[in-house]
Amino acid sequence: MARIAVIGAGMGAMAAAARLAVAGHRVAVYERTETYGGALRRLERDGFAFDTGPGLLPLPAVYRDLFVKTGKEPLEACVELVQVDPSSHHVFADGTRVSLPNASRAGVVSALEENLGADAARRWGDFLVRAREAWDRSRRPLLEEPLWPDWQVLAEREPYPAVPRRKFLRTRTAGTLAEVGAWELRDPRLIALLEGHALAYGLDPRATPASAAVLPYMEHAFGMWYVRGGLRELARAVYERCVARRVEFHFGAEVAGVVEEDGRAAGLELAGGSSVGADFVVAGVAPGVLDRLSRGTRVRGDGEVPDRRGTASRVTVALALRGGRPEGTPHRTVVHTEDREAELDSLSGASGGLPARPTVTVLRPDDPALVPDSGHEAVTVTSVVPAGAEGDREAYAGKLIAVAERAVPGLRDRLLWHEVRTPADVAGETGAEGGAVPAPALAAAGGRLLHPANTTGLTGLFTAGGWSHPGGGLPHAGMSGALVAGLIVEGPEFRGSR
C-alpha cells in the first residue's frame, strides 16, 4: 500500500484518487478552497441554482467507467443523466434557425436539409464521415493511452482526411478548421456551426488544425447529456465515491510545495509550515501553480510537450426570471456572432479586450431543482473571452443579455436579477492564471495543442486534470485520472485500457 498525496480536488484529480483508493492505496486530497469540483461550481440564491462551469456533459461513458471500476453502484444510481433533445438550437447571423437532434447523424442531416437546403445538408453529412475517420485515427493515442514518448508523430500527422482542392496548378488540402469550413462546407452557417465547437474552448479556427473536426463528431456520435440538479451533481457524486473508497479530503489546505528527496517526490509542504509524506504525488493544478510548487525543479524536460498556458476564459451571467420555462424550449441555444473576424481577433489577442459582438450560449434546463417553483426559470448565458479580460462586467453582462434575447424573447421584461462571473472568479476557483480554461488535446499543428504527459521529470510526481494529457473538458479530465492511476498501479509499462 502506497501513500498518495493529491493536490487539488478537481474532476481529474478526484477520478485518479478514487481509482487509486480502489487499488488499495492510501489517498489524501489537499484542496486550497473549501469545496471540491474545480470548475464545476454552483451559484445559489433565492431558491435559484446555476452551474457556473460546464453545463452539459459529452461522452458520459468516461464517468460510467469510473463508477464501474470503483464500486457496485453505477453512475446512473448516483445521478440522473438526461439526454437533451434537441442537442442544440442555433441562431445564425442571417436569422436562420435550426435545431439539431441528439446523437443522430441522419437526424442532423435531415434538420439541416429542412432549414439550410439539400446541398448544405449533404456537405455536412460528408464532413461527418471524414470527421469519424479522424476520430478513429486519433482516439486511442489522444484519449486512451499515456502520451507517447515519440509524441512528435502526433504533432506531425494530420488525422483528418481533407478533400483535395485544386486551384490553378496546385492541389491543396485543408490544414486548419477554418479551411475545412471555407473549402469543404462553404455555407457561412455551416462554417459557424463547425467553428463554434473550437470557439467553445477559445480556439481560433484560423490557427486550429483540421483534426478539431473530432469535436463536432463527438457531440453528434455520443450525444450531449445533462445531470439533473446541474453538473455540480456530477462533482458531488465523484466526491462521494471517493469518500466511500476512504479517500481523505483536507479542504482549506493550501499546498506550498512538493517535497523532493533523493530525486523523487516524497510528499507535500503545506502553507502553514507542516508537511505530509507520500510515496507518490498527483498534481491536479494549472501549469503556473505547478511551477511554483516544484520550486525550481524542472518537471518538464527538453524534448517533451511543454506546458500549455491557457489563452481563453469565460464570462457567465446567471439570470433569475419570472415566468415558467415554456414547453418545448431547447436546453441549449447558440446565438452566433454577426462579426466572426472581430470576435476571433479579440480572442486571439489581435484587438485586445472583450469581444464586441460575441457568440453567446444560452442554457435553459428543464429542471425543477434549479428554481423556487414552476413560475420561475433559471437561465445561464456564457461567452468565451480572453483569459484575464475584465473591463466593465455589468456593461458586458448587459451586452450578453441583449444577445440572449434572440433566444429568449422578452428576456428583459422577465428578469428579476442577475449575477456575473468573470475570468477573475474562474481564477479564484481553479487557480488557473487569468481564469484560463484548458482545451482538449488535438493532433497535428506541430504539437501546439497537445498537453504534457501525465508523468513528469520528477520521479513519483504525476499530473492529472485539464492541463495535462489528454487536455480540457469533462471527459478528458476523467480520462486523465484513469491514465494516472494506471501509471502508478502498473508502472511505466501501462499502455491504457483495452
Image (tube, helix red, strand yellow):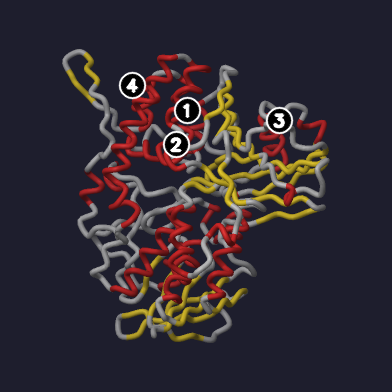
Question: Which one is closest to the eye, mark 4 or mark 1?
Answer: 1
Q: Looking at the rendered structure, which numbered label has been put on residue 183? A: 4
Q: How many marks?
A: 4
According to the picture, the residue beneath numbered tag 3 turns out to be: 408
Q: Do the residues labelled 3 and 2 touch (CB within 8 Å)?
A: no
Residue sitting at x 50%, y 69%: 72
Please rate how many residues cluster around mark 4, counting C-alpha atoms within 10 Å: few if below 14, some from 14 to 19, many from 20: some
Q: Earlier in the sequence, mark 4 or mark 3?
A: 4
x and y percentages locating residue 1 in the rendered image: 39, 85
Residue 292 in view: no
Q: Earlier in the sequence, mark 1 or mark 3?
A: 1
Q: Are marks 1 and 3 in contact (CB under 8 Å)?
A: no
Q: Looking at the rendered structure, which numbered label has been put on residue 220? A: 2
Q: Nearer the viewer, residue 337 or 105?
A: 105
Q: Do the residues labelled 2 and 1 touch (CB within 8 Å)?
A: yes
Q: Earlier in the sequence, mark 2 or mark 1?
A: 1
Please rate how many residues cluster around mark 2, counting C-alpha atoms within 10 Å: few if below 14, some from 14 to 19, many from 20: many
Q: CA separation, marks 4 and 2?
A: 22 Å
Question: Which one is closest to the eye, mark 1 or mark 3?
Answer: 1
Question: Which one is closest to the eye, mark 4 or mark 3?
Answer: 3
Q: Which quadrant, please, contains the C terminus?
A: bottom left
Q: CA separation, marks 3 and 2?
A: 25 Å
Per the image, label 2 sits on a secondary structure element best described as helix
What amino acid type is highlighted by mark number 2?
A: His
Q: Looking at the rendered structure, which numbered label has been put on residue 108? A: 1
Please rate how many residues cluster around mark 3, counting C-alpha atoms within 10 Å: few if below 14, some from 14 to 19, many from 20: some
Tell me: residue 386, above or below residue 167: below
